[in-house]
Amino acid sequence: AQTVTQSQPEMSVQEAETVTLSCTYDTSESDYYLFWYKQPPSRQMILVIRQEAYKQQNATENRFSVNFQKAAKSFSLKISDSQLGDAAMYFCAYRSARNDKIIFGKGTRLHILP
Amino acid sequence: GAGVSQSPSNKVTEKGKDVELRCDPISGHTALYWYRQRLGQGLEFLIYFQGNSAPDKSGLPSDRFSAERTGESVSTLTIQRTQQEDSAVYLCASSLYRENTEAFFGQGTRLTVV
């Protein structure tokens, strides 16, 4: 069975600085998708960025980028120029391309220090 | 509909009562997911549907939990003989099947068992 591990329960970063959130996963599948979601206090889950496992190029979305290391089964999220609005829980997710099951890590709570 | 809709948004029930939580997915989304999120915790996978079938029910915590989906649309999560440890936010998400798209989430139902 697949698992997703986020080893940092909480992190803090100074406003305008860069922070990296870690995620590792375990799977025997070769084809899958990876996602980072943000959950602010409103509770609404918001997609931050996605990555297809067959693509070697790391995905980027404005200030958000990933470091996808397929062999190491690692999928970290880098947030550049951190803003107060980035404060939230961040969840890493794995979606199987074989059966569409989606599982999540336990999350990292990110604090932005003004 | 425009988004995933869950009802009720909040539910307070007495221990031992049965509750039904409803999820209306985005029209045309064939995959539907249920997760449980305890306060400050991650998303715990419960069950997912492909169409009206549930290929993986492994996350249901006990036989008090059941779910069904009809018409490849609305889904109901039922918890029988509720216990205090069932108190949590129950999140529903929907997605296209076999597509590299994210799951779209509802706002969740906050269940409190007193």
Image (spheres, grey):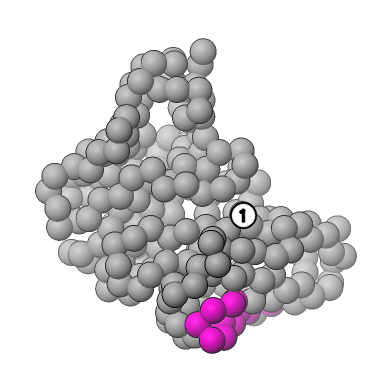
**Is residue A94 visible in this depiction of the protein?**
yes
Q: Position of residue A77 (x, y in %)?
A: 32, 37
The magenta stretch is B64-75
Relative to B22, say whether A105 is above or below: above
Q: Is residue B12 left or right of residue B1?
A: right
Choose between B107 and B12: the one closer to the eye: B107
Relative to A92, say whether B11 is above or below: below
Relative to A67, say whether A51 is above or below: below
Label 1 marks a residue whose chain is B
Q: Which residue is painted at 59% across and 77% down in the image?
A: B74
Q: Position of residue B114 (x, y in %)?
A: 86, 58
Q: Which residue is painted at 14% across and 53% down in the image?
A: A55
Magenta region includes residue B11: no
Q: Which residue is painted at 55% across and 38% down in the image?
A: A40
Q: Is residue B75 left or right of residue B88?
A: left
**Residue B8 quadrant:** bottom right
